[in-house]
Amino acid sequence: MNGASSAFFFPASSGIVPQTVPESLLQQANAYLRLGRNGSFILGGAVAGLVVGATSPATGIAVDAATFLLGAVLLAAMRLPASLHMEGSNFLADLALGWREFISRPWLWAIVLQFGIVNAVEQGSEGVLGPAVAKDHFHGATGWGLITAAQAIGLVAGGLVVLRLRPRRILLAATLGFLLTVPLLFGLAVPVPLPAVLCLALVAGVGAEIFGVLWDTAMQQEIPQDRLSRVYSYDALGSFVLIPVGLAAAGPIAELVGTRSTLFAAGLLSLSATLAVLLVRDVRELRRRASAPPVPVLGASA
């Protein structure tokens, strides 16, 4: 139920951004939104530790649940202009419309295919095997906590970078930024000393955030507003569909061929999938538009 609710929320929330800010400010808006989310990972971890330490784990989870309720109340209080409301449609028509928009853009489906592979590989290898490597080489939970904290700090740093960085070739810069995530897998495979892994984790966070902000900006620039949330739904489906496979397969594969070989293979797969999308011309050449009139929303009042 938690995963399903996220699947409803994130396409809608991402799709509403270009309807509420000027196109020239899309990148900054996406960066601020993600800075808020990533900053909450760091602040939330610290607050959670204090709450659990002062009370109990159960109380900490209850406080966490209360923050979601507060967030829902704040979202429900948002009031959007009537001109942003769209006419009702039906489920099958929405699916067909979103699919036509999705499949008509090679840069879009190519990168979603890339992330179908990359997310399965990285989530499985880092999420399942990373803690095992930390247990053997980095002082267990303490070391792994430092690694995830470094990655979170990198996400915040990446958000600050893209507040100022405005590359003209958005997807080329995004893809090159995402390449910064690959060395962490190789660092865990060796494994290199903990300080080096912390540096790789921080760099990976920077690269992931550069990609995330520029990807959202490219989609919001190129997809008509009245179809954007539908396309985001296909993006999420394609990007996340193989994650359960990666999580389930990482452990058995590591037992069969070894943790080091599995992490090296994961790094090579992630690297290959990311480099492959650079063969798509639109990924290399899609350019930022300086400004453009808003795309009208179907059924909106004049």
Image: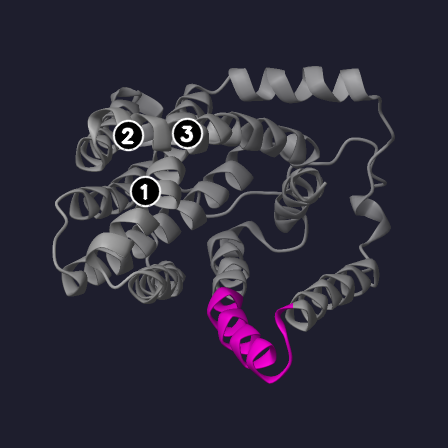
Region in magenta: 39-57
Q: Secondary structure of the magenta portion, mostly?
A: helix
**Around disc 1, counting alpha carbons within 10 Å, would you say few (fewer than 14), some (14 to 19), or many (20 or more)?**
many
Q: Which residue is mark 2?
A: 255
* Image x and y of residue 99, in percent: 62, 17
Which one is closest to the eye, mark 2 or mark 1?
2
Residue that appears at 74% across and 36% down: 297
Residue that appears at 46% across and 21% down: 109
Q: Nearer the viewer, residue 236 or 164?
A: 236
* Label 2 vs 3, first from the N-terminus: 3
* Image x and y of residue 300, in percent: 82, 38
Amino acid found under the numbered disc labelled 1? Leu
The reply, left or right, for residue 34 in relation to residue 77 is left
Specify the color scheme: one colour
Would you place residue 103 above or below residue 195 in this image?
above
Mark 2 → mark 3, Cα distance in angstroms: 14 Å
Mark 1 → mark 3, Cα distance in angstroms: 11 Å
Residue that appears at 36% across and 33% down: 251
Q: Are marks 2 and 3 in contact (CB under 8 Å)?
A: no
The reply, left or right, for residue 130 in relation to residue 91 is left
Q: Which residue is mark 1?
A: 129
Res 246 label: 3
